[in-house]
Image (tube, helix red, strand yellow):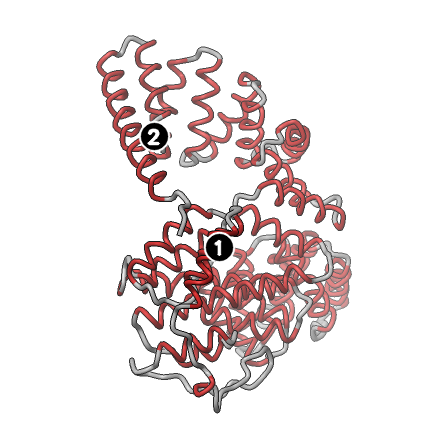
Amino acid sequence: MQLMRLLVGFALWLVLSAGRVCAQSSDLAIKSNRGKELVAAGKFEEAIPIYRDLVRILPDNPGPVMNLGLALHMTGHDQEAVAQFQTVLKLQPNHLPAHLFLGAAYLGLKEPAKAIEPLKTFVRAQPNDHEARLLLGEALLSLDRFEEAAKQFERLSVLDPENPKAWNGLGLSYEGLANRDFQELGKVAPGSAYWLVLVAEARAKADQYPRAFYFYREALKQMPALRGVHAAVAEIYRKTGHSDWAAQEEQQERGVSPQTCSDMASGRGLGAAGNDRTVEPRTDARVRPQRLECDFRAAQYHELLAESKGVRNAETDFWRTRAYNELARQAFRQLAQLPPSGEVHELLAKIRFGQRNYPAAAKDWQEALKFSPESPYYQRELAISLSASGDYEHAQPLLSDLIKRSPESVELNYWLGFTLLSLEKAEEAIPFLRKAVKGDPGMLESQRDLARAYLRIGLVKEAVPHLRAALPIDEDGSLYYQLAQAYRRTGQRDLEKEALVKFHEIQSSKTVEKKRREEQIRITPP
């Protein structure tokens, strides 16, 4: 539906400006005009039979075939729409709108690999078209082709700097590239000081200061002279209320050999957005890590990436990962600074939900609804975020209303069932959780919560198969324990013993691991 909204304006222009059907009779002219009127009014479903008739009568005329494909695409019949757009391209290979909508239809079918070539064809011919470039970027991003996607979103951010999807796509592309280089570092230097620093930075970003402290300390054991690490530890000390320890750590940072960058800066591009970048990529392993560090300290991230292109070793993977992380942060910062809109809040909500910051996600969905109060998508996501954050009282009426409109939705049935169960309304929750399990048996959270609901009302035998189905997501042994209790209550002693053995194994390993981690991640003095 979102894709349809994006293209509907262009679709209307396409149909209304398409070449006239060669009217072999007044009936054809009437049909053609009626089809255009329906499309102009957004009544695509009603236009379909009219264009089917026109295509039957004029099978070699690309106009009616294109319009039929367009009406089918706008009503979600993308499989059939693809066939129509392909027919148009057989009749007229250079028909640019057919290339665009063929790519859009493939995206609607969740076949991004097939969407790329027709979208590239359109973008090459119309390089300044915002919507086509956005679709191409999203197709590439969905296939983890991050470098190509970043190029599309970079260009789009220049063409349409107020478009939140441009900055969101750019940030996600850079995040993907950062993760790629981090994975490469894990291959060439697993557990190295460079690897440990990147893990520490990720933990610090998530406000997991004890864990970040531990990884920074481990990195310093390997490379005491690694610049910036003592300063990062000092920042953790300050944020955890140890300013005296922070001062000592800063003193140690000053004792690290300083980096001299002035002699490396000559002949370099400025690196700011929109400026020329004059650095040629290096294709050998002789790039100096010191130069990459200087680029990073000067925030010349694109220069760093060009300098290290094609080189694979621990130092270049380290600095490339950091550069991409910084570029991702810049993109998301631009997104957050855009004027308020439903779309901006939608993207921010998705980011925060992915970070498990559910209360913040709910607030952004509430803000999005101020711009589109009737949007069922925004209403659904708000209800889910409220439930995920533990605000069940406010989530329940929203979910109850939404499920009246979409009674077969697996997602809504699960979240309403989960919410009712969390409100101690197990009997009311069961019908919704049953429907969720039936609709998607592989959704193990539904299996788990249906079992929990059955147990709460004493239907032990009914709970057992769902407990067993949910065991792959049992992280702490609680499901094995509940299963053992269910076996005991149904007289299956041997199975009870097996489940208890597994429960004790998980608990034992978790206890040992927890103790080890607690010993490791304590924030200690310098």
Residue at 34% in and 21% down: 481
Task: Work out whether residue 412 or residue 193 is closer to the camera in this orientation and state it.
Answer: 193
Q: Which residue, given by chain and number where applicable, does mark 1 sit on?
A: 246
The spot of residue 466 in percent (x, y) is 39, 24
User: In the drawing, what numbered circle is on residue 471?
Assistant: 2
Residue 83 in view in this figure? no
Three-letter residue code for mark 1: Ala
The spot of residue 433 in percent (x, y) is 50, 26
> Mark 1 or mark 2, which has the lower sequence index?
1
Task: Work out whether residue 24 or residue 354 is closer to the camera in this orientation and state it.
Answer: 354
- Other residues around mark 2 within 10 Å, as few (<14) / some (14–19) / many (≥20): some
- Other residues around mark 1 within 10 Å, as few (<14) / some (14–19) / many (≥20): many
Task: Work out whether residue 336 or residue 148 is closer to the camera in this orientation and state it.
Answer: 336
**Label 2 residue SS:** helix
The spot of residue 139 in percent (x, y) is 50, 63
Three-letter residue code for mark 2: Leu
Of badges 1 and 2, the one in the foreground is 1
What whole-number distance in Å separates the C-alpha atoms at marks 1 and 2?
Answer: 45 Å
